[in-house]
Image: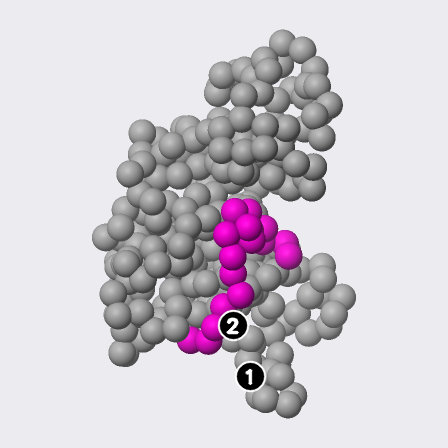
Amino acid sequence: MCLDIAFYSALQLIHDYFPNLTHDGEISFDLETGMHFMALGHNRYPVITLENDGYHRKYFEWGIIAEYMDTPEKIKAMRRSMVNARSEKIQGDKRSFWHRIRGNRCLIPVTGIYEHREIKGWKNKVPYHIQLKDRPLFCIPGLYHYNPKLADPETGEVRGMFTLLTRAANPLMRQIHNSGDNAFRMPLFLPEELELKWLQPHLTDMDIENILSYEMPADQLVVDPVYSIRSRIQRPDGQPKTAHFDWANLPPLGDDQAPETQKALF
């Protein structure tokens, strides 16, 4: 799963990327929050949709609550699995929820994402910050949903929610996201022209399949080990979460056998 993303620059980057952008509501979003945004908090995040009058910036919750999740217990148990959608399910599984809402397409603007690498014998996984080469801002395709059963009883407002699309990892990302139930996956990284095409309203099944099947070449990714992003302990070097961190005895990618056990840094 992709659970950690970053947006650590001015929101003006989004305006430059999407001309004549309309804001749908004010957002509460600062650089400290954006440096590391985690899916499982189910907090709100700016996403982009395309409507008849142009691009819109929404402020949606990360993690969809489907109508069949009709009790607090079901929501608690199942929402975690709804922060990411496997791209293979959108076209290939007509019974899936993702196939049903495949027309509700959005983009999630980021300056980078994080993924964790397991090294045998180390106490903790090593986080990596991942960006697209020469892309200060890029967008990950997603799907959004409004659940009418969750309408505010006083205002009638229906909460917007989104999920982020993933696919099988390319050779580089397989060496980083190398463990867990969803190992060897990565976000659906796209070139800019396919990102914008994802929002177009009249895509054919073949158009959608061509986008979903795209694999970003490994040489277009910039990957860098960073310090723990989920710990509340401050980095010993005082640098921001996205900055490179020199781990002692870190094996090169592709070699996950540690020469010695990881020092307890957290």
Do we see residue 217 in this rendering?
no
Q: In this view, does 183 lie to the left or right of 216?
A: right
Residue 204, quarter of the rendered image: bottom left
For the residue labelled by badge 2, is the local secondary structure a helix, a strand or a loop? strand
For the residue labelled by badge 1, is the local secondary structure a helix, a strand or a loop? loop
Q: Position of residue 252 (x, y in %)?
A: 49, 16
Q: Kindly identify which residue carries mark 2.
A: 160
For the residue pair 90 and 157, the one nearer the viewer reads as 157
Residue 28 shown in magenta: yes
Q: Position of residue 110 (x, y in %)?
A: 42, 50
Q: How many residues crowd around disc 1 within 10 Å: few (fewer than 14), some, or many (20 or more)?
A: few
Badge count: 2
Do we see residue 71 in this rendering?
yes
3D distance between C-alphas at marks 1 and 2: 9 Å
Q: Kindly identify which residue carries mark 1.
A: 157
Residue at the far front: name it: 238
Q: Position of residue 118 (x, y in %)?
A: 61, 27
Residue at the far right: name it: 73
**Looking at numbered disc 1 in the image, what kind of residue is underneath it?**
Glu
Q: What stretch is highlighted in magenta?
A: 24-41
Q: Eyeballing the image, is 192 above or below 162?
A: above
**Residue pictured at 63% horizontal, 9% vertical:** 259
For the residue pair 67 and 130, the one nearer the viewer reads as 130
Residue 216, quarter of the rendered image: top left
**Looking at numbered disc 2 in the image, what kind of residue is underneath it?**
Gly
Residue 257, quarter of the rendered image: top right
Q: How many residues crowd around disc 2 within 10 Å: few (fewer than 14), some, or many (20 or more)?
A: many
Dividing the image into 4 quarters, which one contains the N terminus?
Answer: top right
**Residue pictured at 34% horizontal, 45% vertical:** 136
